[in-house]
Each structure stands twice: as C-alpha cells, then as structure tokens.
C-alpha cells in the first residue's frame, strides 16, 4: 500500500464496498453502535471527562514536526485549539474568514503558526487556500474542522442551500477534499470533525428535499441538519479512507458560551449550571481526538467528553451518508 492516494481515487471510491459488521464493542458506552469500517480498533475509554481541559488531555505531548490546520481559529474553541496545539510544538495553520482575523489569532499564541484566510462560502477561495497549504509541501497530520455558525434567525441561501448547511458542511467538505492528499501523506493523518449533540434537533436526519428551506425553515432544526451532515460526512470519509493510515472521527464539544451562540435568544449563561463548559473544557475533546496516541487507527466514531459514545440512528445511517456525499460532490463538482 502506498503512502498516498489521489483525491480523485477517494472521491470515486465505491460506496458499495462491503463493510462487515464488527462484533459488539465490549465498552458499555458503545453498546448498539454500528462501526463504520470493518476491522477498525474498538476505541478505548479514556480517563478524561466533562471537566478535562485541552491542556490536560495533551499534557506531556511533544507535537514537534506535526502540522495541524484548524478552521475558525480566531475565537472560541478554534482559538484555544490553535493555542494548545502550538503550545505542544505543532505547526498550526490557523484558518479564519479573513487573513486579518487569522493573523491576529496566530500572533496571540506562542509557537509556530501560519495564518490562512478561508471563507467557507467562497468555493474558489477554498480552492486557493488549499493550494496555499499544498504549496507548503508538508503532510497534514491533523485537519480540525471547527468553524461553524448556528441558528440564523432568518433563512439565507448560499449556492442554493441553507447557509448553516453551506458553511458547516459544504465548505468543510470541499476544504477536506482539496487537502486530502496531504492528510493521507502523513504517517497517521487525522480528520477531526466538530459536530454536535444538536444533531438530535434534526428528527428526520438530512431532509434532502428541503436543503434550500423552501418547504419550511426552522433555525434550530437547520442547525441540527448541518451537524448531522458533519457526523455523516466523517463516517463516510472514514469508510473511503479504509486501507490508508488516515482516520476520520466526529465529536460533540459540549455546551459552551462562545460567539457561535450569538444568534440565540438573549439569555444568561450561568456557569454554575453543570450543563455548561468553559472554553478550555469545550476544546478538550477535539484536542484529544486529534492527538491521543490511544486512538491510533480508530476511525468512524463519535466522541463526547473525550470518550466514544453512540449518536442517534441518523448519524449511523450509511445510506444517508452515501446520499449526502453524492449530493455534496455535485454541489462542489466544479471545484474538486
């Protein structure tokens, strides 16, 4: 097996490839989970949990020589991910909507960073940004798809689909496809997709007949659809990466008061409420999934509080994942 496979090979990989069902995991939290990839290691539980921080889950790690790319690096979880990975020695490419925002975020942390402008609704701009990364000539050990928007109060369309779906899923899909050669070129490249427990807000999973909101628009459900899409994308990508050293996993970071919630009805965030996490706590799971040596070869799973858990049935629907992949491929076909 070569260390590299072409992006086009992955894009055209047959969804019909047989995927045998693994034996039921022995870890209780995974009872009932349908693994995405035959033969993948059953992920172990970790000693980390809800109150663990990103610094704690990466303590003692030396990420020198590793390269990571983090979208949404200029605030919230992305900013903390940028900081912690750079602190541990990784070269972190910090991506934000504008170069000015990326530069400001990168300048504020210690360590080796490179700012990058990635506006996730600008498809030609995504291609250009990915080319800048490719021109660096280094493998990409960690691709952390963190940026997102949430519960836009009014329907907005981008490229013919609802904006949350476009930003949270479509833009990240294209970015990943354009960077996939570099992920696969790494010794053990990891794609880390920040989904959300809010995938449960989409009771029907992906409503393929309403991606433009023409039938109805509910901001909460639309966000849930975009987060379901994140999880399904990660699952299908894991299947398509089978046979390489690269992996893909999704996660729920927790409920954290960040700029993401700026469109929600105004309310007090009482941090004494045990439901809420701080930003360092909310960043822990994505840093754990991106870096933990315990997850070598683990792919196609969904994490919460630094442990694998079972999402709802739609996030395990392989037919829905394959349909979503084909539709998204069609949406961005001119840029692949």
Image (cartoon, rainbow, N blue to C red):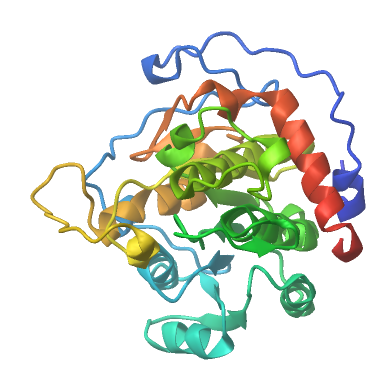
Asked whether, in this view, residue 148 is left or right of residue 273, the answer is right
- Quarter of the image with the C terminus is bottom right
Decide which of 212, 29 is in the foreground and name it.
212
Seen as rendered, the residue at the extreme left is 272
In the image, residue 178 sits, relative to residue 309, either above or below, namely below
In the image, residue 219 sits, relative to residue 18, either above or below, namely below
The answer to whether any part of residue 229 appears in the image is yes
In the image, residue 76 sits, relative to residue 37, either above or below, namely below
Quarter-of-image position of residue 249? top right
Total numbered badges shown on the rendered structure: 0
Give the x, y percent position of residue 1. Answer: 87, 40
Q: Residue at x 27, y 53 (%)?
A: 281
Asked whether, in this view, residue 327 is left or right of residue 143, the answer is right
Give the x, y percent position of residue 96. Answer: 54, 76
Q: Residue at x 55, y 21 (%)?
A: 313
Q: Residue at x 64, y 68 (%)?
A: 120
Q: Residue at x 75, y 59 (%)?
A: 174
Seen as rendered, the residue at the extreme front is 215
Decide which of 18, 128 is in the foreground and name it.
128
Asked whether, in this view, residue 100 is left or right of residue 206, the answer is left
Give the x, y percent position of residue 294. Answer: 47, 38
Asked whether, in this view, residue 313 is left or right of residue 129, the answer is left
Quarter-of-image position of residue 334? bottom right
Decide which of 330, 57 is in the foreground and name it.
330
The answer to whether any part of residue 243 appears in the image is no
Give the x, y percent position of residue 161. Answer: 69, 55
């Amino acid at each position: 097996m070569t260390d590299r496979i072409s992006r086009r090979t992955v894009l055209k990989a047959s969804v019909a490839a047989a995927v045998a069902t693994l034996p039921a995991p022995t870890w209780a939290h995974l009872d009932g989970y349908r693994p995405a990839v035959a033969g993948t290691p059953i992920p172990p539980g970790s000693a980390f949990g809800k109150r663990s921080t990103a610094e704690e889950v990466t303590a003692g790690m030396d990420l020198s020589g590793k390269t990571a790319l983090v979208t949404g690096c200029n605030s919230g979880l992305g900013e903390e991910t940028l900081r912690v990975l750079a602190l541990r020695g990784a070269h972190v490419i910090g991506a934000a909507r504008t170069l000015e925002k990326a530069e400001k975020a990168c300048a504020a942390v210690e360590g080796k960073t490179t700012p990058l402008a990635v506006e996730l609704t600008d498809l030609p701009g995504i291609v250009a940004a990915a080319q800048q990364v490719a021109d660096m000539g280094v493998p990409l050990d960690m691709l952390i798809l963190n940026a997102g928007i949430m519960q836009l109060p009014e329907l907005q369309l981008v490229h013919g689909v609802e904006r949350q779906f476009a930003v949270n899923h479509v833009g990240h899909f294209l970015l990943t496809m354009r960077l996939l050669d570099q992920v696969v070129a790494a010794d053990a490249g990891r794609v880390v997709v920040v989904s959300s427990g809010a995938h449960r807000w989409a009771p029907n999973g992906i409503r393929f007949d309403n991606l433009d909101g023409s039938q109805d628009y509910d901001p909460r459900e639309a966000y849930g659809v975009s987060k379901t899409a994140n999880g399904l994308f990660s699952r299908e990508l894991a299947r398509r990466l089978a046979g390489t050293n690269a992996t893909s996993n999704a996660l729920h970071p927790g409920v954290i008061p960040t700029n993401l919630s700026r469109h929600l009805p105004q309310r007090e965030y009482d941090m004494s409420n045990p439901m809420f996490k701080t930003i360092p706590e909310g960043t822990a799971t994505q840093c754990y999934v991106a870096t933990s040596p315990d997850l070598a070869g683990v792919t196609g799973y969904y994490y919460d509080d630094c442990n694998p858990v079972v999402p709802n049935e739609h996030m395990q629907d392989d037919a829905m994942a394959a349909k979503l992949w084909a539709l998204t491929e069609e949406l961005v076909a001119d840029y692949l």
